[in-house]
Amino acid sequence: MKVQIHSIHFDADKALLEFIDSKLHKLETFNDTLISSNVFLRIEKNDERENKLVEIKIHMPGKELFAKRNATSFEAATDEVVEALRRQILKVHA
């Protein structure tokens, strides 16, 4: 699966990019037909601690999956989004 990561208005460090990439590639164990994914990382301008937003769109034959989550860190938000996408993949595959 091809992974494209877009960090909006900031530069994501290499460790974060590798973390997201490895998490997404683990989804391929549930469905090997995943084509590509687009990841958008944003820091929302608000006073809440959970201001890190991760949005992921996954393309697969005949279907597009999407999830987004807020958390205090990009890693935590990525974990939540990947888990949501895993559930969607299993639902589609069932």
Image (spheres, rainbow, N blue to C red):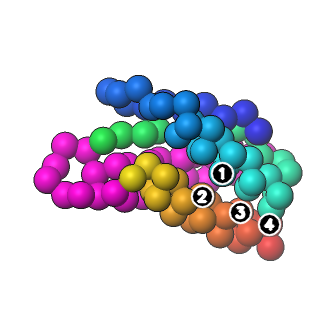
Q: Residues under labels 1 and 3: Cα distance?
A: 14 Å
Three-letter amino acid code of the residue under disc 1: Lys
Image position of 68 (left or right of 46): right
Quadrant including the C terminus: bottom right
The answer to if 66 sits in the magenta stretch is yes
Q: Give the range drawn in magenta.
A: 44-72
Which secondary structure lies at badge 2? helix
Q: Is residue 44 visible?
A: yes
Confirm or deny contact between disc 4 and disc 3 (CB under 8 A).
Answer: yes
Note whether 62 is above or below 70 in the view shown. above
Which residue position is annotated with label 2? 82
Q: Residues under labels 4 and 3: Cα distance?
A: 6 Å
Which residue position is annotated with label 3? 89
**If you read the primary sequence from the N terminus, does the residue marked by circle 3 or circle 2 appear first?**
2
Which residue position is annotated with label 1? 23
> Is 82 in front, or is 64?
82
Which residue position is annotated with label 4? 93
Confirm or deny contact between disc 2 and disc 1 (CB under 8 A).
Answer: yes
The x and y percentages for residue 85 are 62, 60
Three-letter amino acid code of the residue under disc 4: His
Three-letter amino acid code of the residue under disc 3: Ile
